[in-house]
Image: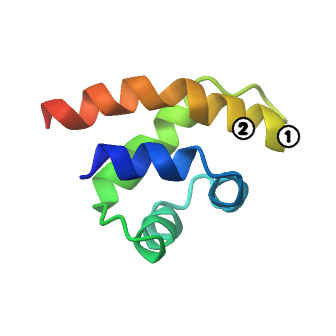
Amino acid sequence: MDTAKMKELLNDQKVVKILMTRRGQTKGIQKLFRSHGLEVTMIEAETIDKTIEKDLPEGADESAFAKAAQKAIPELEKQFKIS
């Protein structure tokens, strides 16, 4: 996976807003990233979802989700560079 492209997409507010609505939907997350030019496997999509949700408080709004996505970027980069 192109980690630079992933980082770019997780910094994009429009993408993060859509990503928030697809929490827990691995196939939907995969389609979202593919529609923005980033090929991800189902496992990668699930990893992205779980890593973001790990730091997400219950009942989080869009800004909290965006902050959690930002916080998850370094961890995701490490995970995907190893694999």
Give the number of the disc on residue 27: none
The mark total stands at 2
- Specify few, some or many for label 2: CA neighbours under 10 Å numbering under 14, 14-19, or 20 or more: many
**Residue at label 1?**
61
- Could you tell me which residue is drawn at 24 percent across and 52 percent down? 1
Bin the neighbour count of mark 1 within 10 Å (Cα to Cα): few under 14, some 14-19, many 20 and up: few
Look at 68% across and 62% down and name the residue there. Answer: 18
Q: Position of residue 44 (x, y in %)?
A: 32, 50
> Which x, y percent locates residue 77?
32, 32
For the residue marked with disc 2, what is the amino acid? Answer: Phe
For residue 53, side relative to residue 73 (left or right): right
Callout 1–callout 2 Cβ contact below 8 Å: yes
Q: Is mark 2 on a helix, strand or loop?
A: helix
**Residue at 30%, 66% in the rendered image:** 39
Q: Quadrant of the C terminus?
A: top left
Compared with 27, 70 (above or below) is above
On the image, numbered disc 2 is attached to which residue? 65
